[in-house]
């Protein structure tokens, strides 16, 4: 049970429009774990497909092929899973597109335990879901990682297209002692 939860930062598009990515920089190494809470959707208006609902995550601006991801997903009556090693990002499905005016907002929770531990690779848990009119409801859960022992001081999050105005990412630090 965490003893203290502190909001470190929040990132939102400017009121003038959509953005393709969010970044948290200069993350202090003073917490035990990190949690990212997000709500959003993209400006994609073409045919809906799973890859249009993805975000790519990188740490410390590293594009090295030392990331891996695995997730289970379900949308409507279809369930599936995907896993990959030696990637240059972590692939997390969760946010809806703007293909229909009925498409709602997606919600996401990402947990990064031991993010500042320099003697272990980093593990990432994700839980997300959305109401996508053209794909029905979608949900995903995943276990991902970064095969690197560096403390995470930066998180970069990239949309398949652009996050629309009103989307946000909030970064929290957790102290367990």
Image: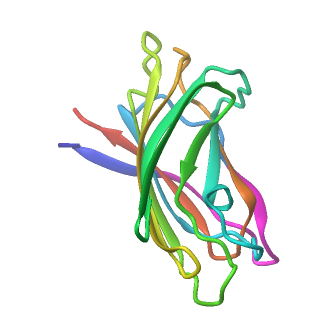
Residue in the image at 72% along x and 67% along y: 13
* Front-lying residue, 26 or 146: 146
Residue 175 shown left or right of residue 149 in the figure: left
Residue 87 shown left or right of residue 107 in the figure: right
Residue 168 visible to an observer of this rendering: yes
Q: Is residue 65 magenta?
A: no
- Picture layout, residue 133 above or below residue 144: below
- Picture layout, residue 175 above or below residue 119: below
Q: How many marks?
A: 0
Residue 21 placement (x, y as % from top left): 73, 54
* Front-lying residue, 106 or 134: 134
Residue in the image at 42% along x and 19% along y: 117
Q: Is residue 16 magenta?
A: yes
Residue 85 shown left or right of residue 48 in the figure: left
Q: Quadrant of the C terminus?
A: top left
Residue in the image at 59% along x and 31% along y: 153
Q: In the image, which residues are magenta?
A: 8-22
Residue 57 shown left or right of residue 174 in the figure: right
Q: Quadrant of the N terminus?
A: top left
């Amino acid at each position: 049970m965490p003893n203290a939860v502190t909001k470190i930062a929040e990132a939102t598009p400017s009121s003038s429009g959509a953005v393709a990515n969010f970044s948290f920089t200069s993350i202090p190494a003073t917490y035990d774990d990190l949690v990212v809470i997000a709500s959003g959707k993209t400006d994609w208006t073409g045919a809906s497909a799973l890859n249009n609902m993805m975000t790519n995550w990188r740490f410390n601006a590293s594009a090295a092929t030392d990331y891996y991801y695995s997730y289970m997903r379900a949308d409507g009556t279809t369930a599936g899973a995907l896993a990959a090693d030696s990637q240059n990002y972590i692939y997390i499905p969760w946010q809806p597109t703007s293909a229909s005016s009925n498409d709602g907002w997606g919600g996401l929770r990402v947990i990064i335990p031991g993010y500042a531990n320099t003697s272990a690779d980093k593990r990432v848990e994700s839980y997300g879901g959305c109401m996508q009119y053209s794909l029905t409801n979608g949900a995903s859960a995943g276990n991902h990682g970064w095969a690197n022992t560096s403390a995470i001081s930066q998180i970069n999050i990239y949309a398949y297209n652009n996050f629309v105005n009103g989307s946000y990412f909030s970064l929290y630090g957790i102290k367990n002692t």
